[in-house]
Image (cartoon, rainbow, N blue to C red):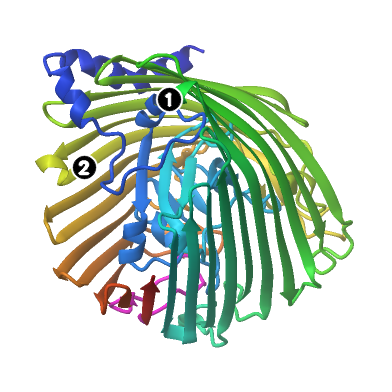
Amino acid sequence: MRNSIISLFRGIAPALFLPALCAASDPADAQEVRLDRLPVGAPAPAPTAAEVAQDRATAAASEVTADEIRQQQINRLDDALRLVPGLTLSGRQAPGGAETLSIRGLGPRNTRVFIDGIEMSDTSQSQSQYPMGEFATGDIERIEVLRGPQPGRFGPDTGGGVIDITTKRPTEPLAGTAGAEYGADDTWRGNASVSGLNDRLDYRLSLAGTRSGGYSDFSKERGGVEKDPFRQWSAAGRIGLQATDGLRLDATARYQRKHLTYDADDRDVDWSRDETERFVRVGGRLDSLGGRLVHGFGIANSLVTRRYRGEGTKDDTYDGHKTRLDYGATAALSDTVTLGYGADATRESMQQHTPGFAPLAPDMDSHTWRGGAFATAGVTPLPALDLSATLRGDRHSAFGGRGTWRLGAAYTVGASGTTLRSSYGTAWQPPSLYERFDPCYGRSDLRPERSRGWDAGIEQSLFGGGLTAGATWFQASTRDQIDWVYSPPSGGACSGGGYVNTSRTRARGLELELTARPTATIDLRAAYTWQDVIDADSRERIRSRPLHQGTAVVGWRFRPDAHASLGLRYRGVTAGYSGESDAFLTADLRLSYALTENLTLQGRVENLFDRRYEEIRGHATPGRSGYAGLSARF
């Protein structure tokens, strides 16, 4: 307890005491220029129910906007997330393959992804995560990344953080978009959308797809020859009804189908995988008391299936199913005090059939449920000072009850455009169904992971918002980390090994972020992360997380109808199960030209200098790749 109190004090002290040192500043000025988030972009969407403004202001947050996605011709969700500090992506295995994501050194199971209120994790995965890959990025209005524990409305299992994605809403009675491109490895991409609204009803429908001849997933430099093609298509729809002046109802659905082929890390192998994702949510929002009390509610259902074919498999299948019911509300108790509260309940199930991988092992069919409730209080005792506190309690069908919490503070120095921010929080992550019940590798006696973390940061705005820079120091730790560990086989059904609670980990690091617009035609965005993640028992660094990584993008509107951008990406040395991967630096060049008001020609060259590198040892990455296409809107 003593260590927890010391850590808590150390985490929030900078934001609590620095205001006293800056008391000479004018509170009125602070109110005018206070910064809620780092990037400069379009206005934020309307707050969701149970979202407390003070809690949001105290979080280490970054955003990627629709304009950035369009100008940088981003087609994959992982490429958009590379623009944000503190995030580590695993690297792609196979053309079209997805990547796993970790934040601040904590594993993929500690990050949750929400799209329009739908929690997207795949319950059939070993770490119950949402893989980052091909995605209809033209649908995205804003990606917000909240780093550090977020145990309130997002759930107790968010020790790394949360990716909160908002899709586009109709803004005209009738509008549409269409686009197509062709490029390297015989790759075709296409997308289309239509949307509309009237006084009470609005809708948006979209389609997107990719088909590629691919390249050899087993690195060509190591002898890879056979190309590994992939194809993917997705559909999404949303319909909203303003039933009364205060009540809005929404229904959202997303579907994706993917087929990809891939190799081992030491040879060409004829492996393939079919994946299907289906997500549906129905909910609403009720404004009452003149908008001072806002309720949000919904029920979501998801189904994710994976089917494996090829050497050593016989149509092995993994199916994950989840139903989540949620309610949240925000009450403005006064001009300076806000209360958010709510509850949610989730049932997860998994079915597994592996006649090829483990022919003697029985099928698996398991489920679990969890329910929780939370309250978040936000207070603004001074015009420039925000304080927040969150308390959450959860009960799990297998692991009983557990509480999590978060404290945060932020102070804005109005005269200088400086924001000081700090937070401390805890999280709780039960093992996945796969880790507990897989016939070969599961262990029913696994304990949940527990994590905690704190951060302290500063954000500085200069030149009337033309330059915004931020720096955040963080520390995080886990107990009872769950890992796969090899052991000799105990019978003929399985190859040996399994999931166990292995160790404690500690992470510390520095996140830097910069956005600037030095002239009316030039803009810059850069992010850098230094992170040191160690096994707290052996004191050895966990080398699957790079020590250094960063990105930078410079955009130039060299004509009123033309835009160019250059993107750089660096990642340091990493090591995984297959060995060590060297550091690398890549560059991408992108150009777009507006042929008419509604028709744009665009092209890009990825890996401009044809850098040969591996993100995962033995698995290839594309060489220099060119793409060209057209996009239209009406």
Determine whether 197 is above or below 447 in the image. Answer: below
Question: Along the polypeptide, which appears first: circle 1 or circle 2?
Answer: 1
**Residue 147: quadrant of the picture:** top left
Residue 266 visible in this rendered orientation of the protein: no
Determine whether 359 is above or below 224 in the image. Answer: above
Q: Residue at x 67, y 75 (%)?
A: 272
> Which region of the structure is painted magenta?
604-626
Which of 118/19 is in front? 118
Residue highlighted by disc 2:
469
Residue highlighted by disc 1:
424
Query: Is 85 positioned to the left or the right of 292 in the image?
Result: left
Which of 314/344 is in front? 344
Does the stretch in magenta take in 139?
A: no
Label 2 neighbour load within 10 Å: few <14, some 14-19, many 20+: many
Q: Position of residue 555 (x, y in %)?
A: 21, 63
Residue 242 visible in this rendered orientation of the protein: yes
Does the stretch in magenta take in 624?
A: yes
Q: Residue at x 47, y 49 (%)?
A: 165
Query: Is 53 positioned to the left or the right of 295 in the image?
Result: left
Residue at disc 2, secondary structure: strand
Which of 435/515 is in front? 515
* Disc 1 to disc 2, C-alpha distance: 22 Å
Q: Position of residue 24 (x, y in %)?
A: 11, 14
Residue at disc 1, secondary structure: strand
Find residue 515 and name its label: none
Query: Is 626 positioned to the left or the right of 75 in the image?
Result: left
Q: Position of residue 69 (x, y in %)?
A: 36, 61
Q: Position of residue 487 (x, y in %)?
A: 73, 51
